[in-house]
């Protein structure tokens, strides 16, 4: 039996409550992560930033205070072990007013956009020519003390080149990092092109965070999905109720967020998201001008997608059908899990005897059938 925390707003207390409700089975490794997150919350409250020193002083100052920083936490392990769930609990409960939580891929896109804008201002002569990372770090540190990332990874040389310079300034300014990842820090960008460019950042990262391996033996997300019907039909209160019940089970009743993903200047609305799971409507994803790159952006942010209210389509809705085809192809190719509420079974979702969409939808129907199988959910299918 777990020791109940005396603080009702702690991560551990919330975790214990979830165990008591039957939402979770107690996991000693998850308990340890919860305790470490609560300890970090206490340190952030106890050690306020030196406001007298000012942002620029913290950003560029050197001296004995450099060693007096709050260490963040880097939690790594396989998918479905509860990393994101615990970080979301920590973030929601944190009293730190200057906090921000986002997917790492989203953060790096934002940084590249900011670099572009600074260079544009330099070219226009509105600001002095300088390293664009400096004003970007200043802006982030001004509004953020606690920075939480989900799915920390480095797969791109452009990201690798930016990381060291950016985070050296953020760390100097007192920004505290909490993140989840599938790999230990020293294996980020492993075997990547010009990996030596990222090594100083990795050394700095290891100094600024405590690394914790969440090596729970069970993929809890797949356990819930593999035992549930993930293709719900028809569109009716009962199927929506079953969909909501599965959502609650997979998100453990945690607070959901309304967010917008950005991709090439477009906004992708997300009705609800929690613990790397997203809820969309057919209207949001297939009745607005989104394309394959937008759907790929979704796969980078979420490992499971709930899709509500998919109607039967015909030639009059061929544009929506085409987007739906692209969406399913992208989710399937990237092995994203799908929970769907639809008006009809896959083979009856598109009613037309001719046309490109009718031919392509045969493949879509086949993929929808496979995506609801236990083999696909557990990663055993041939994708």
Image (spheres, helix red, strand yellow):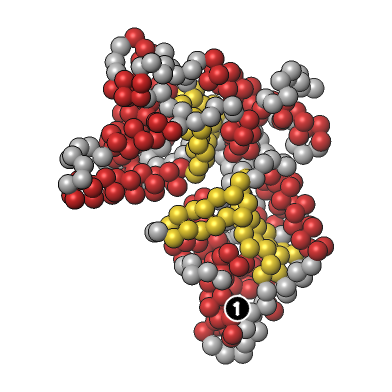
Residue carrying label 1: 362
Pick out the residue farthest to the bottom: 354
Pointer 1 local density, CA inside 10 Å: few below 14, some 14–19, many at least 20 = some
Image quarter where the N terminus lies is top right
Q: Left or right of 84: which side holds 300? A: left
Pick whichever, 282 or 98, lies toward us: 98
Q: Is any part of residue 151 visible from this angle?
A: no
Asked which quadrant contains residue 361, the reply is: bottom right
SS under mark 1? helix
Q: Please state the total of marks drawn on the protein image.
A: 1
Residue at image position (26%, 40%) is 132
Residue at image position (61%, 46%) is 257
Q: Is any part of residue 94 visible from this angle?
A: yes
Asked which quadrant contains residue 346, the reply is: bottom right
Pick whichever, 9 or 293, lies toward us: 9
Pick whichever, 210 or 269, lies toward us: 269
- Residue 337 location in percent, x, y? 62, 56
Q: Left or right of 149: which side holds 142? A: left
- Residue 317 location in percent, x, y? 59, 81
Q: Left or right of 283: which side holds 206? A: left
Q: Is residue 183 above or below residue 67?
A: below
- Residue 156 location in percent, x, y? 35, 47
Image quarter where the C terminus lies is bottom right
Residue at image position (59%, 49%) is 258
Residue at image position (62%, 67%) is 282
């Amino acid at each position: 039996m777990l020791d109940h925390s005396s603080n009702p707003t702690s991560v551990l207390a919330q975790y214990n409550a979830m165990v008591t409700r039957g939402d979770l089975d107690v996991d000693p490794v998850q308990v340890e992560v919860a305790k470490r997150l609560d300890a970090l919350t206490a340190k952030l409250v106890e050690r306020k930033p030196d406001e007298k020193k000012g942002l620029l002083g913290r950003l560029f100052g050197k001296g004995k205070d450099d060693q007096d920083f709050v260490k963040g936490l880097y939690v790594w392990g396989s998918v479905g072990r509860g990393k994101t769930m615990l970080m979301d609990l920590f973030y929601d409960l944190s009293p730190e007013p200057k906090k921000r939580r986002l997917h790492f891929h989203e953060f790096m896109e934002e940084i590249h956009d900011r670099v572009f804008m600074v260079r544009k201002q330099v070219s226009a002569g509105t600001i002095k020519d300088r390293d664009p990372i400096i004003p970007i770090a200043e802006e982030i540190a001004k509004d953020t003390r606690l920075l939480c990332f989900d799915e920390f990874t480095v797969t791109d040389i452009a990201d690798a080149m930016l990381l060291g310079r950016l985070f050296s300034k953020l760390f100097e300014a007192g920004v505290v990092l909490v993140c989840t990842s599938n790999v230990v820090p020293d294996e980020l960008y492993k075997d990547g092109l010009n990996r030596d460019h990222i090594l100083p950042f990795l050394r700095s990262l290891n100094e600024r965070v405590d690394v914790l391996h969440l090596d729970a033996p069970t993929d809890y997300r797949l356990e819930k999905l593999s035992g549930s019907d993930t293709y719900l039909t028809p569109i009716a209160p009962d199927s929506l109720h079953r969909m909501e019940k599965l959502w609650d089970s997979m998100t453990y009743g945690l607070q959901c967020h309304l967010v917008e993903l950005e991709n090439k200047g477009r906004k992708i609305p997300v009705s609800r998201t929690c613990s790397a799971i997203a809820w969309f409507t057919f209207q949001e994803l297939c009745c607005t001008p989104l394309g394959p790159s937008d759907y790929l952006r979704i796969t980078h942010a979420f490992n499971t997608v709930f899709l509500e209210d998919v109607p039967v389509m015909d030639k009059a809705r061929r544009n929506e059908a085409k987007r739906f085809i692209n969406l399913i192809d992208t989710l399937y190719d990237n092995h994203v899990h799908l929970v769907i509420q639809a008006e009809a079974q896959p083979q009856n979702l598109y009613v037309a005897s001719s046309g490109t969409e009718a031919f392509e939808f045969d493949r879509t129907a086949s993929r929808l059938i496979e995506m609801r199988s236990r083999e696909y959910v557990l990663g055993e299918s041939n994708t």
